Amino acid sequence: MSTAWVTLATNDGYAIGALVLAHSLRQSGTQHALHILYTDGVSPALRAQLTSVFTASTLVNVLDSRDIANLALIGRPDLGVTFTKLHAYRLTQYTKAVFLDADTLVVQNADELFERPSFAAAPDIGWPDFFNSGVFVFTPSEQTYHELVELATSQGSFDGGDQGLLNQYYSNWRELDAAHRLPFIYNVTSGAIYSYAAALKKAGKDIKIVHFLGSAKPWQKGAAHAHVGTHWAQWQSTFDSNVAQTLPQNLNPA
Amino acid sequence: MSTAWVTLATNDGYAIGALVLAHSLRQSGTQHALHILYTDGVSPALRAQLTSVFTASTLVNVLDSRDIANLALIGRPDLGVTFTKLHAYRLTQYTKAVFLDADTLVVQNADELFERPSFAAAPDIGWPDFFNSGVFVFTPSEQTYHELVELATSQGSFDGGDQGLLNQYYSNWRELDAAHRLPFIYNVTSGAIYSYAAALKKAGKDIKIVHFLGSAKPWQKGAAHAHVGTHWAQWQSTFDSNVAQTLPQNLNPA
Ligand SMILES: O=c1ccn([C@@H]2O[C@H](COP(=O)(O)OP(=O)(O)O)[C@@H](O)[C@H]2O)c(=O)[nH]1
Ligand SMILES: O=c1ccn([C@@H]2O[C@H](COP(=O)(O)OP(=O)(O)O)[C@@H](O)[C@H]2O)c(=O)[nH]1
Ligand SMILES: [Mn+2]
Ligand SMILES: [Mn+2]
């Protein structure tokens, strides 16, 4: 069984996120490969870092005109990044994979995710009948990839992004066995809800993956954010210890 | 099979909420009885309204010294209201019941909730591995009541309220079959999460029960709130058409 964590970066900001994520995965002692999907929006200096830190890398094209299915996407620039995430399904060298957004951080070993059935994801705190697509367990498959592209072109995505599209595709997710619904500790996104504080106190030590969802990302210098301070600081410290010194000075956000 | 919707009011504000809720339930064409639990914190004028609008009512005591189990709660005033909600479990004249917070509004018939297995509740958007205790399907039982009181006195509640206590008691809820996890449309609480807007557009027409969770309640005149405008207006209009003219003038928040 060949397995990998998969992430994606289409520009230098997300590439920095992906590097921090990769280091956090290594620090967690993961037994699985780390695979990065990147586009030519990532600058050469950062591509070199990505290919050295990740186990494997794939340069993907946002709109690949050699792919008939992709052609239909032309004229839908809003689906560009969505489509790029879908490339993860083409990594059929792996029998099981876990996609992680580049704005996630692994704070404790989470290798047991690979024992989950495919498809599995955690609820989205905006509307918990939908899953959040920042962390998901999946089985790479060309057929699924084509069905997803087909769905994107025929119906579009209800939120304009990959989360809406994947929720339309796996529309029965809410009704599946509990094994398919990842505990929230695998994709902790902080909401401004008062019940969050008490839950965080009770379940905080169990958190395995933090997700810096939203417009403020930890690689943006001085970003005002609504995330848990210790999580944000943990990202910064992983960045400072492992990534900062490897970046060209103009790319260093710190 | 005898069934009822159950709610609770310990003061005049929540009693007004309960009246609006009861009218919304009648407007939905429900086939089930409406049962109100109230304490002597509700003024006589509102008690009269409650007993005339609800099918049945029970005056409950926050700290009932005749109940040995309750005695242990003395010295834990923070558990007072929690304990009062637990009284719902003593309504053993019903074989199945659905508890609704007094700050909920039924916007479409939801009688099918009584076909759900007990216990059933919807995820809390603060931490979706826990359920929100504003809407739950349960089977009244003196034994469960005593076990809950026992748990309250021995361990307390991790959030100081009924939600923490019930989540400790039903700690395997997350692992239960999907039937025990109510769809979010039965307890829609609005979060300030950007994915909420797209989901609301997609699933909004399916919403059955709205929950005005948080410190701003619709019976508080001019309250600044983060709820969906149309939901807040729907509460106001139910209040204006059915409740306003029945209240003594000093209690009318409009
Ligand atoms: O311009 C972009 C936007 C997104 N992404 C990738 O797509 C994921 C999802 O986007 P984001 O995390 O910004 O969305 P959010 O989690 O905030 O909804 C990112 O983590 C990246 O892996 C990217 O590479 N470039
Ligand atoms: O002072 C109070 C507080 C609460 N409640 C009852 O307990 C429920 C839960 O409290 P609330 O709705 O204020 O909590 P939230 O949903 O905002 O967490 C209310 O809806 C009422 O039914 C009450 O009667 N009096
Ligand atoms: Mn993300
Ligand atoms: Mn409430």
Image (cartoon, coloured by chain):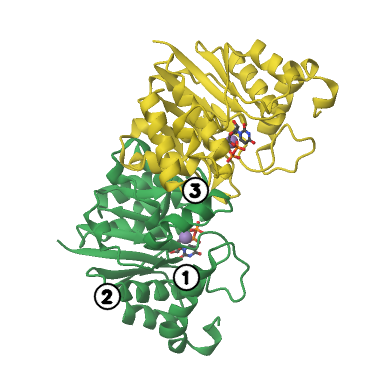
Chain colours: A green, B yellow
Mark before the other along the chain sequence, 2 or 3? 2
Describe the element under mark 3 as helix, strand or loop: loop
Q: What whole-number distance in Å separates the C-alpha atoms at marks 2 and 3?
A: 32 Å
Tell me the chain of label 1: A
Q: Residue B106 at x, y = what percent?
A: 58, 24
Q: Which label lies toward us, 2 or 3?
A: 3
In which of the image's four quarters is ligand 4 placed? top right
Q: Is mark 1 within 8 Å of ligand 1?
A: yes
Quadrant in which residue B175 is drawn: top left
- Where is mark 1, residue-wise? A14
Q: Chain of mark 3?
A: A
For image coordinates 75% across by 18% down, the residue present is B45
Mark earlier in primary sequence (1, 3): 1
The quarter of the rendered structure image containing the C terminus of chain A is bottom right
Q: Which residue is rendered at x = 39% and y = 56% of the image?
A: A185
First along the sequence among labels 1 and 2: 1
Percent across and percent down for residue B149 are: 44, 36
**Is disc 2's CB within 8 Å of ligand 1?**
no
Name the secondary structure under disc 1.
Answer: helix
Q: Which mark is residue A55?
A: 2
Q: Are marks 2 and 3 in contact (CB under 8 Å)?
A: no
Q: Amino acid at mark 2?
A: Thr
**Count of numbered circles in the view:** 3
Q: Quadrant of residue A3?
A: bottom left
Question: In the drawing, does residue A191 fall left or right of residue B16?
Answer: left
Same subunit: marks 2 and 3: yes
Q: Position of residue B115 (x, y in %)?
A: 38, 19
Give the residue pinned by disc 3.
A125
Q: Residue at x 53, y 84 (%)?
A: A252
